[in-house]
Amino acid sequence: MLQPSHRPRITGGSTRSLDGARLLSRVLQLLILVVPAIATGASRVAQDQNGGLPNVPAIEGLVDVHSLDIYNEANKLHALVAGRFTGHANPMLAYLASSDGGRSWSKPAFVTAESDPPIVSRRGNDAQVAASGPHLVVAWQQRGQFPTGGPLRLARSGDNGHTWTQSLLPDIDDPTNNQSYPDLVADASGTFHLVWLDDREENGNAQGLRYLNSTDGGRRWSQQTTIDGVVCTCCWNRIGIMPDRSVAVLYRDDEPHDMRLAVRNKAGSWKDLGSVGDFKWHFAGCPHCGGGFASAIRKNAAQLHSVVWTGIESAPGLYYLKSSDLGASWLPPFRLGDSSSREADIAALSARHIAVVYSITTGGKGLIHVRQSKDGGKTWSQAKALTKGPESADHPRIVATPFGFRAFWTERAPGGGRTLTMHSLDS
């Protein structure tokens, strides 16, 4: 849309004083300047909103999605997809990027080769990507001794994802050689932070939450640290950078089965900040459901927003929580969805504008819903369905971009397999 300072002005008296030829000439000039600008603006809004409907991003050759991660850095969306691509017999891991809020995507750059061990990563245990300028690091689980498990594999790129170099994790003293549920983030200094789960103590019904970092784009990694030695076995973790530059990890504890927050300060020490939603849910099993968190600054004060799921019998469901002291304490939880609401993610466009996407299971099928808050989490909109069926959708993700919120998820394709779907929530 044309900005006011760029609008053409007719000067030199009123239009009444102009003769017919001069008037016609000025009108034509005005149309030449204004009409293309209006058309371009309308086209951009239509592309961003897509008529209010979800769309399938045009990703070259992708026919079936097994794993998905979305990372937003420096106004650029980075996607890591594991799945089947035309022309390849085996599933591949591919990286792609978008600089226009997801309207268009780069050609996939393959991180793995068909001769590599099979990819174990799947929805809920997704392969992960993080970026810092031209440097990118990805982590995924490949098949090991058993078909459903194996070691984490790493890859790095120093040229914006065009080429990749693979490596194994450094020596982490894990005799099981089975690491899963990774997550990655890069901080403002370019340091990459990695967490994952493994059962090197062979507890059987629990795993340990481990941590490494790399200051040189993934070439070398620090000594491994155990953040918590006994956590839930199969819920995804979320790692992020706080406004004070500390590193935070949201994960599901073993007993009770509530979500928990741990923070690493700039000196490198980890601190347990306790439960995020102190539900005291006692459960002998794994719900296969993690959580999400986002941070924002309001009036020079840091705020932390989180979404968690609990199966506690008295009030199961999905909850939003807010902290004004970086997780040291939390306001009482607000229930976003009932027991049918599970997989969720959260993002913040600002300290006031927050959005949560989540799945609801009804009639045996998963539907994706969204709720938004425009007042920093005090009140929330009614749930809005982003999918209508008939195919089942799952594991939504949401990121805040300069173009607005972008939600992603996978859903069953009519002929089998999964498709990647995106929705533009705001323009």
Image: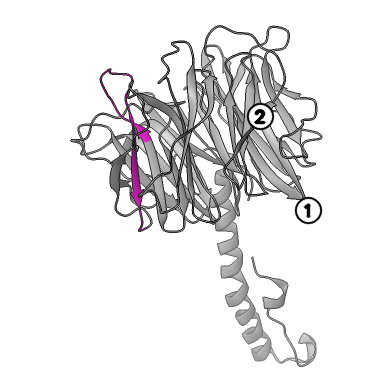
Locate residue 340 relative to residue 5 in the image: left or right. left
Locate residue 366 relative to residue 317 in the image: left or right. left
- Residue span colored magenta: 140-159
Which secondary structure type mostly characterizes the magenta part of the structure?
A: loop
Residue placed at 79% from the left, 91% from the top?
A: 13
The answer to whether the residue labelled 1 contacts the one labelled 2, judged by CB atoms less than 8 Å apart, is: no
Residue 42 in picture, x, y percent from top left: 59, 58
Viewer-side label of 1, 2 = 1
For the N terminus, the quadrant is bottom right
Question: Which residue has dot 2 on it?
Answer: 307
Q: Residues within 10 Å of mark 1 (few under 14, many from 20)?
A: few
Q: Residues within 10 Å of mark 2 (few under 14, many from 20)?
A: many
Question: Which residue has dot 1 on it?
Answer: 300
Does residue 209 appear anywhere in the picture? yes
Q: Say which label, 1 or 2, has the lower sequence index.
A: 1
Among the 4 quarters of the image, the one containing residue 129: top left
